[in-house]
Amino acid sequence: MMLKNRKLEKALEEAESYDEWKDLALAYDKERGRDRWRSNDVSSQYDHVSIRIRLDRLQSQRARHDYAGLLFTLNEGIHGNMGGMGKSSLYEPALFGTKQLIVDYVDEIASALELLASPAVDDISFEEKLDFFRRAHHCFGRSALMMSGSGMLLYFHIGVAKALWEQRLLPNIMSGASGGALVGALLCTHADDELTDKLSYDYLTDEVAREAELAIQDRGTGAGMLRAAEVEASIARMIPDMTFQEAFEHTGRMLNISVAAAETHQTSRLLNAITSPNVLIRNAVLASTAVPGIFPPVMLEARNKQGERQPYLPSRKWVDGSVSDDLPSKRLARLYGVNHYIVSQANPAVLPFITDSKHQRGVRAILTSTARQTTREWLNATAAIWQKPLNRDTAWARAANTFISVVNQDYIGDINILPRSRFHNPFKMLMRISSEEAMELVASGEHSSWRKIEMIRMQTRISKVLDEILINYEEEYVSKTKISRKKKINA
């Protein structure tokens, strides 16, 4: 049996698609008895009794066509952590998926919502349904994909995005800093049919090979440090010349790019179609990739009413967004009602110091967390003591503020996708990499995502259903309102 498990483990490592990985994962779970764990409701990690009772009630009401009762039950509350079912620990025992009870419950909620939204339920008024779906959507919240600063490890983010896109699990709200900003811009400036092509292996292989060829033509070698002009040229080639508002209208995806102020005493910004609709995305990406001390700070540009380019906040310049707000969870919560975060974390400066869960169990995990928090507090205290002496030297003050900003950030979310290899030399973030290395990073992003696919599917399904229902209902509401106004005018 051990020999068979080792063969399965090797095959899992070498899987070339999610479907192949899934079949192998199911076989591996069966060999280890994890399929029996999935089918058994009982676990101390969640309130299986409450969820079973609620599931039975929903199924009974749907079978009896008790739509008023179904609406009442759903009105009692829909949330992704009902009875603790959203815990990451419930996705750890089995390689594939979680308790079947959780899967059945999520499926039943989704089916009940779709039924209530359908014309088949005609004993509940449109207005009452609309009111319910608005409240449910607001209370349940939304999911976002956050891509960390990464330098040339940005190809890991591309692999993550590719895996999510192929499973139709890519959130419509996403943020990026530094290398993550470039990948986010790629995703949010190309419509669905375009994105399928951009994330294909053929396109990625050709694009990476082209980058390597251009480096050889420019410098006579593919090795060495990237230059600002090369980064700008790559951004111009990969990202269409769009504003944040134009990108949203083209794709329906909400791009957010973190930039940090180059000047002391200025605050960082999260650029998007809400806060800065006319800002040009290419400039925003260039600013977010401008590593302090390596690349020059960037002035943002925007399009005015006449469609002409002009400086945006001309008195200010901006640099790498990851130094101030690598994962802008609080801002996304405020702007979009996001309360569930999928993180693609490839920042080599922090990877060795993080785990893939906020709620690790065990004595070792508690001690590690305590040590990390203690170190953070000591660094903050030291910075406070040295603040006045450092302020005499602007360069040292800026460096100290940047360091403390990096230390005080949170670098994980609810679902964390991390490279299998945690140790990467941070100084190689801005070095050119070969085509083979880039495609290995893409494959690493895919493989790291596959283990999380079912967790993402379960934890985002209800919000996706609510999104689709509410969009349709809001469109119908606008249509009904227009018709009603015309009738009043004609009367």
Image: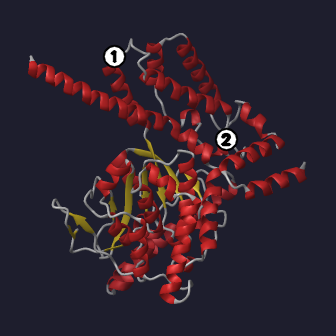
Image: 296 above or below 454: below
Q: What amino acid type is highlighted by mark number 1?
A: Ser
Q: In this view, does 30 lie above or below 290?
A: above
- Neighbour tally class for label 2: few under 14, some 14-19, many 20 plus, Cα within 10 Å: many
Q: In this view, does 59 lie to the left or right of 312?
A: right
Residue found 63% across the figure and 24% down from its top: 52
Seen from the viewer's position, the closer of residues 202 and 187 is: 202
Of 12 and 351, the residue lying toward us:
12
Query: Which residue in the structure is indicated by mark 2?
Result: 97
- What label does residue 210 carry, if any? none
Q: Which of 346 and 16 is in front in this view?
A: 16
Going by the numbered disc 2, the residue's amino acid type is Gly
Q: Is mark 1 on a helix, strand or loop?
A: loop
Residue 201 appears left or right of 96: left
Position in image of residue 453 (x %, y %): 61, 47
Disc 1 residue crowd, few under 14, some 14–19, many 20+, Cα 10 Å: few
Q: What element carries label 2?
A: loop
Whether residue 213 is visible to the viewer of this picture, yes or no, is yes
For this view, does 481 lie left or right of residue 449?
A: left
How far from the left and from the top, in percent, is residue 246?
A: 30, 55
In the rendered image, which residue does mark 1 sit on?
125
Residue 179, given in percent of the width and then of the height, sits at 47, 68
The quadrant of the rendering that contains the C terminus is: top left
Q: Along the line of sight, which residue is nearer the eye, 287 or 20?
A: 20
Which residue does the image show at 79% across and 43% down from the upper left?
A: 27
